[in-house]
Each structure stands twice: as structure tokens, then as C-alpha cells.
Image (cartoon, rainbow, N blue to C red):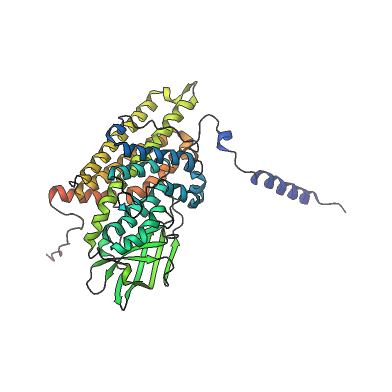
Amino acid sequence: MKVPATKIQEEMSKEAKSFYFDLPALDISVAFPQATPASIFPKCTSDYYQLDDLLTSEEKAVRLKVRECMEKEIAPIMTKYWEKAEFPFEVIPKLGALHISGGTIKGYGCPGLSVTGSAIALAEIARVDASCSTFILVHSSLAMLTIGLLGSEMQRQKYLPSLAELSSISCWGLTEPDYGSDASALRTTATKVEGGWILEGQKRWIGNSTFADVLVIFARNTATNQINGFIVQKDAPGLQSTKIENKIGLRMVQNGDILFKKVFVPDEDRLPGVNSFKDTSKVLAVSRVMVAWMPIGIAMGVYDMCHRYLKERKQFGAPLAAFQLNQQKLVQMLGNIQAMLLVGWRLCKLYESGKMTPGQASLGKSWNTLRARETVSLGRELLGGNGILADFLVAKAFCDLEPIYTFEGTYDINTLVTGREITGLPSFKPAPLRPQSRL
């Protein structure tokens, strides 16, 4: 029997499509051999004013060991996990071995770093991967620090040692669907019952929440109308955490929606030091300093990548680094980083001396993220088409910086915190509307 020609053509077409579309992508080193991808991370060339001269020997040692770990262990795998929006659980033991979790907390297996040392560590993580730095920020500078500063002695002894080793993981739940910048108005409730408390409500954007063993949660006491803090176990009945999908930034971070449906928390897991929203400021003061260093690290990594790329990539018979416009952009990026480093360093010193104000912390975070945004945008221009590929870091950093520009207080809210401090006039809420005259 003769097979119709159209049938043969259809089968050939299927085979051709299968052949072409089933082929894996070329390795980036084969597809674009003229420049080295970020999986082989560039050496640091962005510390132009030699910040090391301002650091103690201990702080220098922390910087070096974190840098070596990130470049060797994280850089080769970060693009794969970022693309899949999955967390690289395989790196947790390596991050734990750095002994930086717990940051400034002394005792309980925590490192007892200076604020500067803790900030430097976070920046070095962010230089290679902002998702990993956010993981550590949430776990260490928010959840662990809340237990360290506002927990009981029993709670510190029970929870901090394993959290410091990263053998257990924590998250920190303040933000809600209806209350982001206006977090003090949160609606999640805590009702006193015999032997403990019942939590009801919802949290959103909570990093690490889908796999955290311990959840530090803030809720409104129904009797006092004040904000209280609680330590919630991951297997508590009525607790549900689901991943937020479709993010374009910090894709490795597992942000979640948390639902509390009559979740019981025993009395021993209520944080005794949280009796109003103002108590959270004791933690946020430190964490905002840490967040001010994350854009520093991101900008440094982008500069380092662009510096190497421009020297490797050639067009019109010369390396891109030989062109005046490119040099101007590179120097502008470098200048931004030096200013950001000095702002970050001074902020640490103000905190360590007990002089830092909320307005100073907010200015450091808002200004550094703004300068980092400009720096990363220039890096995106310098890399041309490769500036939209995560393989060369800049595109990934470009996206990762956007949520950092927003979390721990948006640029605008942090600006208003500083504005209130320098003028004495709050401007967070619009003036009440006057009733219109009928005349």
C-alpha cells in the first residue's frame, strides 16, 4: 500500500521538530567564549578606597572566609537555582560552617560579631548572590535577633544553638496582605486561652517560611490591642505556609503566604520582650543596618563582573574597556560603591557607639539602594545583550535589587522616617480632607 506524500511530510516534520527542539542549550562558555560567566566569579576590584584599612583583623578574616566560600561554593550553582526559583538546600551546611548566623549575638553558639563584621559578611554573600544573603538576613538578623534581644533566657537556650548552626531554620512574620508599610496596623490576632494563645490571621511575603522549623510571628493581643511576639513550630496544627510564585527577583528565596487557623502557641513560646509595636524597633534598627549593606554587596559584584567583561569582550578590534563611554560608566559605578561603602561603615560605627538614630538607619538603607539601582542599571548597559542573561550576573542582580529596594521599608517610607527626624513633622498619612462647601 502506498503511503500518501502528505503523511510522509508530516512524519518528517515531527522528526525535524523533535531534533531541533529537544536539543539542550549550548553551555554558555561554548555559546559565548569571549567572556567568562559568573559561575567562575571575578576577583574583587571594587574596593577602590581600600575599606580593609578600616576593619579589624577579625572583620577582615570574616570578609575573606565568606568571600572564598561564596566564590567557590555558591557561584557555580546560583544561576541554575535562580532560574528554577528553587532554594539550594545543599549550601546550608556550607553557610553554617562559616559561623556567621546569629551575627552580633553573644553566647548560645552564636559568633558574637561586631555590627561591622556582621554587615561585611552579609555584603560578601550578596556580592555573589542576593537570595542567599536574604536567607541569612531573615534567619539571623530578624528571627534569631528577635529571640536574642526579646526572648526569655529559656527561649534563647532552647532555640539559638541549633539556629546558629543552621541545623534548624527560622523565619520572621510581620507583613500582612493588607499591611505592608503600615505594619503597625496588622490584624493577625492572639487570644489568651488556658496554657497559651490562639493565633488567627494571615502573613505574606515571609522569607524562608515554606521550610522554616521555627516561625517568629507578631500578632495583636485581643485583650490589650498591643502587638505581641510568638515562636511558632512548623508542625503546629492549623498552620499553613505556601510559596508565592512568579517572582522576578530573589527567585531562590522561598517567600510564602502563612495562614493561621486557630494555631495554639504555649505560654513558654510567647516572647516576653514584645509588648508593643515599638519593641520591634530594637530588632529593626540592627536589621536595617544589615539591609543597607546588601545593595553594597550587589553593586560590588556587578562592578567586578563588568570590569572583567569589558577587558575580555572585544568589538571594533579593541576591548570594550578601551572605549571612553564605557570607562565613564565604569568609573561612575565605582564612585557610587565607594560612597555606599563609607555610608555603610559609618552607620555601623554610629550603631556600635550607641549614637545611631532611626532616621540615620533609614537614610543609609534608602540612599544605598538608590545608588545600587543606578550602578546595576549602568552594568546592564555595559554588557549589552549579555546584560539580560543571568549567566553574567548583572541581569540577575538587576532583578534581585528590586525587592531589596522595597523590603525593610520602601525607599519612600524610609525617606519619610528621615524626613520626620530632621523636621519634627510626620508626613506618613495624608491630611484629612475638608468637607467641600456648598457655596
Q: Is residue 275 left or right of residue 33?
A: left
Which residue is located at x 27 percent, y 50 percent?
286
Side of 261 relative to 192 (left or right): right
* Number of marks in picture: 0
Give the residue displayed 33% in from the left and 41% down from the top. Answer: 120
Residue 141 percent across, percent down from the top left: 32, 52
Q: Is residue 127 left or right of residue 186?
A: right
Q: Nearer the viewer, residue 410 or 359?
A: 359
Can residue 177 be seen here? The reply is no
Which quadrant would residue 162 be assigned to in this image? bottom left
Name the spot of residue 341 as percent of width and height, x first: 29, 37
Residue 44 location, quadrant: top left
The N terminus, quarter of image: bottom right
Instruction: Pinpoint residue 33: horizontal percent, then vertical percent.
Output: 55, 31
Question: Residue, x 39% and y 47% (percent of image)?
Answer: 99
Q: Residue 56: in sight, yes or no?
A: yes
| In the image, farthest residue toward the right | 1
Q: Is residue 253 above or below residue 301?
A: below
